[in-house]
Amino acid sequence: MQLYQLGPAWYRNTRISFLVWSFLGTACIKASTTEDPIDRRLNPPSKDANDKISRDLPGGDRPSREGQGTQGAQGEEAPLPQGTKLPAPAAPVEKAQVKFITGAHFYYNDDQDQARRRTFKVDLPEAATSYGKITLETRLYCPAPACDSWDRVGSLGMETTEGVQIEIHRFVTAYGVGQRMSVDVTDFATLLKGPTQFWVQIDTWSGPRRDGGRYGGGWLLDAQLVYEPGTPARKITHVIPLIQKQYVTYGRPQEPTLRQKSVEIPEGTSAQGTVLMFITGHGQGNTENCAEFCPKTHQIRMGEQEKSQTIWRDNCASTVTDGRQRGTYTYSRAGWCPGAAVAPWRSDVTLTPQELAQQLTQFQYRPQAYTNRLDSGYNDQGHTLPQYLVSGVLFLGSIDAP
């Protein structure tokens, strides 16, 4: 009834035709935008349609975090389809500090009353591998009546779920004063997460009840891990033990110094790796005053590759401690200084295609050949057995690691 009021008959007929064709056109357009996915594969969409698909599929141009759309090819803001749900952004990790040792007392009164080695259980951040840097901070200080008067070897490590001991930090105590140390342990990140058991050993022979505390009461220790946000310099996915911490007697031909091991290579490992070795020399009054005061070359072999390094440290006089040391702390030594952390020897290695295919390689370690012609009369004072304290691991990444 209302159409007849719009004008003459020719106008009314034209107007009706226009409305019908508009309705049919709109329906066709809607049908074309809901085409069957199979048709889409058989009849590839145009470039314009592909641009829209790339925005809608994972991996295409993503909307901004504010949900304001994406920039088009001409710099225009493309609107998001109504009802689009943006994926929740990954929560960034925040700096974390985990103090796992506070005031732990290391001492020796006698064989029944001593604490030279202690263990500590702690829950570490599960996302440890998402941090850019992990630093181990430690502090040694004095119990009553005083700190140990002598320089003592110390180690901090962890025990894997398989019961393997892995050393991640070695140090030598100062003569009678405290010290603070900070070392980068980021490469151990794959182990520094979740429930973890640490161990610490300090080879002190002093205690508050031994000789009336004449040589001090041992040591007190604090330790914490600091996790900092960021991207690590490299992504380590495997830490493979090569040598668990042990002493290698030096200068006795009848006692071999060679240490070797068959190393299983995990599937999907990249060819590039790094061997990390802690090596320190101990013992004096021997031929060449080994092994504390003699620079010697040490060799590792991974498959067909050989690497060598002279283990020696000549900057002991610059060591910073919590107070002035006594004793011979300024003397150069085989890989260590009293009152300082031990710097490990790092050596890059490349696995061969055959080793990767067989998932197996061979590792060897040996110090330079040497014969001690004064191998007798040890007195635990000025003449002590020459030895090297060694441990080592292999760091590997995955071929898929960024």
Image: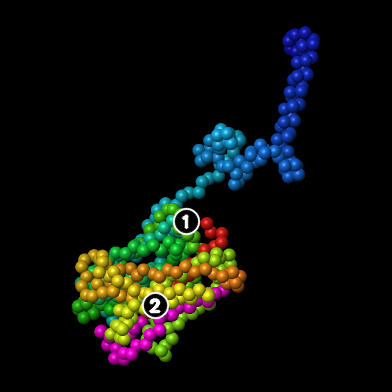
Look at the image and say whether residue 386 sits in the magenta stretch.
yes
Tell me which label, 2 or 1, sits earlier in the chain: 1
Identify the image quadrant of the N terminus. Answer: top right
Q: CA distance from mark 2 to mark 1?
A: 37 Å
In depth, the one of 51 and 352 nearer the eye is 352
Q: Which residues are magenta?
A: 360-387
In depth, the one of 238 and 298 nearer the eye is 298
Residue 311: x %, y % from top left: 36, 74
At a point 40% along the width and 67% down the height, the residue shown is: 121
Disc 1 residue type (three-letter): Ser
Q: Secondary structure at mark 1?
A: helix
At a point 63% along the width and 42% down the height, the residue shown is: 54
Look at the image and say whether residue 246 sits in the magenta stretch.
no
Residue under numbered circle 2: 297
Residue 217: x %, y % from top left: 24, 74
Residue under numbered circle 1: 130
Residue 96: x %, y % from top left: 39, 55
Query: How busy is the neighbourhood of tag 2: few (under 14 within 10 Å), some, or many (20 plus)?
Result: some
- Left or right: 322 in relation to 96: left
At a point 52% along the width and 65% down the height, the residue shown is: 272
Quadrant location of residue 211?
bottom left
Quadrant location of residue 344?
bottom left
